[in-house]
Image (tube, rainbow, N blue to C red):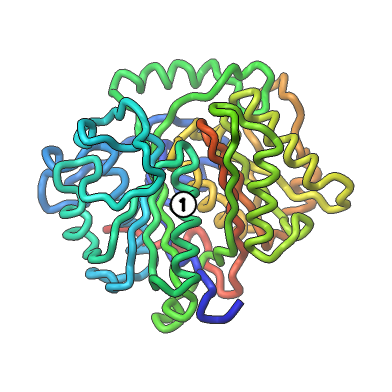
């Protein structure tokens, strides 16, 4: 792959139940904290106006994550004209549901150019706030929407269509009434990869990743968290069913696209939704792909800490993988006794922590779309505490 076509990750932003910065989020994951409701997002901390009549809670979380990522990447407003925005959300859109928090069903198109997003004048808000003049594209691939948005944006940069892509995955709890229910369920939930989990807990959050061509990033003199190497997807013929064979195809495709083999993967960031069939499919995929391999990758997930964040899952997984690469640390998988079996125990985790250079994410869709992404550590990499925060 030529120098011009390398794709770097130069900025990240997180709005999550564990914290609204990369360092707070990472600390929460490493310390085993659990949360399902985003706290302390005050619009007046980020806007010069009260946006409640112009943008919904989902749109607010999206813009805040994007603001953090843009500042973290050292980009200035207005952003370069060769910048695109790629948004992933599990809900989809219909003409009658653009202004509400709940969409009755996914929109038929898998990918549409949007004029309005979760608010009366969302493009106006994001263009004023971030200075974006390029296209905004929405991806409706169920829970894998954010991961698909990232993959397609990476392809466009690799092909030379854009220099910068602002990729955001976002979803929220539908109503305020969902929050206490989620908190009550959290006390009883066993976590992922546990035979008694019984299912997932709906959560909320936003993750933003700045993709940038290596040539453009190096002209600006910025350091990167890592390199986006490629992605793969698989479409299941059984709706609402996650099968190991479909995840196998998604991961195999990602490795081919990235020019690596599964044996070169040091870390796998699973979805870990807590749905028994989905968790079992992820473990089945691991066993099939790395069967007979002497060096198996370490495994982690943030599902046990944040619940199921739907369209935000893919970007938050990638951010988690980048943090693991930067800090050479793999957080333990959170669950309780009764688990159906883990890929790695504490001894294997400890042995692998000093040699993590390539991470792979596996994003399972609640529908029939699954996506995998490969990222690697960059030689001039940034650390978690290097993140630049919005002041």
Identify the residue at horizontal 53%, vertical 63% (top origin).
383
Identify the residue at horizontal 54%, vertical 74% (top origin).
6
Q: Is residue 23 left or right of residue 53?
A: right
Q: Residues within 10 Å of mark 1 (few under 14, many from 20)?
A: some
Residue 65 image point, x, y percent: 34, 51
Q: Which quadrant would the C terminus be assigned to in this image?
A: bottom left
Q: Nearer the viewer, residue 296 or 290?
A: 290
User: Residue under circle 1?
Assistant: 23
Q: Quadrant of residue 177?
A: top left
Residue 44 image point, x, y percent: 17, 46
Q: Is residue 145 above or below residue 197?
A: below
Q: Is residue 101 left or right of residue 18?
A: left
Q: Nearer the viewer, residue 318 or 13?
A: 318
Q: Secondary structure at mark 1?
A: helix
Q: Nearer the viewer, residue 30 or 155?
A: 155
Identify the residue at horizontal 56%, vertical 46% (top origin).
371
Residue 29 visible in the picture: yes
Residue 170 image point, x, y percent: 37, 42
Q: Is residue 239 above or below residue 315?
A: above
Q: Quadrant of residue 369?
A: top right
Q: Which quadrant would the N terminus be assigned to in this image?
A: bottom right
Residue 30 visible in the picture: no
């Amino acid at each position: 792959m030529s120098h011009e076509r390398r794709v770097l990750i130069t900025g990240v932003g997180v709005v999550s139940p564990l914290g609204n910065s990369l360092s707070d989020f990472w600390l929460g994951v490493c310390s085993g904290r659990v949360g399902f409701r985003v706290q302390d997002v005050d619009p007046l901390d980020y806007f010069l106006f009260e946006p409640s009549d112009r943008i919904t809670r989902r749109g607010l979380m999206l813009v805040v994550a994007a603001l953090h990522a843009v500042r973290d990447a050292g980009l200035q407003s207005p952003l370069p004209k060769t910048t695109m925005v790629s948004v992933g959300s599990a809900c989809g859109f219909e003409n009658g549901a653009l202004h509400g928090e709940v969409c009755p069903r996914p929109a038929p198109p898998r990918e549409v150019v949007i004029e309005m997003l979760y608010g009366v004048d969302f493009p106006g808000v994001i263009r004023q706030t971030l200075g974006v003049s390029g296209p905004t594209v929405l991806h409706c691939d169920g829970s894998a929407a954010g991961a698909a948005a990232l993959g397609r944006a990476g392809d466009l940069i690799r092909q030379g269509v854009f220099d910068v892509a602002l990729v955001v995955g976002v979803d929220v709890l539908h109503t305020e009434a969902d929050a206490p229910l989620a908190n009550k369920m959290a006390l009883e939930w066993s976590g992922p990869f546990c035979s008694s989990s019984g299912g997932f807990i709906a959560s909320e959050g936003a993750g933003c990743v700045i993709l940038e061509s290596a040539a453009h990033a190096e002209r600006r003199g910025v350091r990167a968290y890592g390199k986006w190497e490629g992605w793969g997807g698989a479409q299941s013929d059984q709706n609402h069913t996650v099968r190991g064979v479909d995840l196998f195809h998604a991961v195999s495709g990602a490795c081919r696209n990235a020019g690596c083999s599964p044996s070169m993967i040091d870390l796998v960031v699973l979805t870990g939704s807590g749905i028994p069939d989905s968790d079992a499919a992820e473990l089945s995929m691991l066993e099939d792909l790395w069967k007979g391999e002497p060096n198996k990758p370490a495994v982690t997930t943030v599902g046990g800490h944040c619940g199921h964040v739907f369209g935000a899952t893919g970007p938050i997984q990638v951010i988690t993988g980048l943090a693991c690469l930067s800090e050479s640390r793999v957080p333990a998988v959170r669950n309780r006794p009764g688990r159906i079996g883990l890929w790695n125990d504490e001894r294997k985790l400890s042995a692998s922590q000093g040699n993590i250079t390539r991470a792979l994410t596996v994003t399972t869709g609640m529908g029939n779309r699954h996506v995998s992404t490969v990222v690697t550590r960059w030689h001039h990499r940034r650390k978690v505490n290097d993140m630049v925060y919005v002041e």
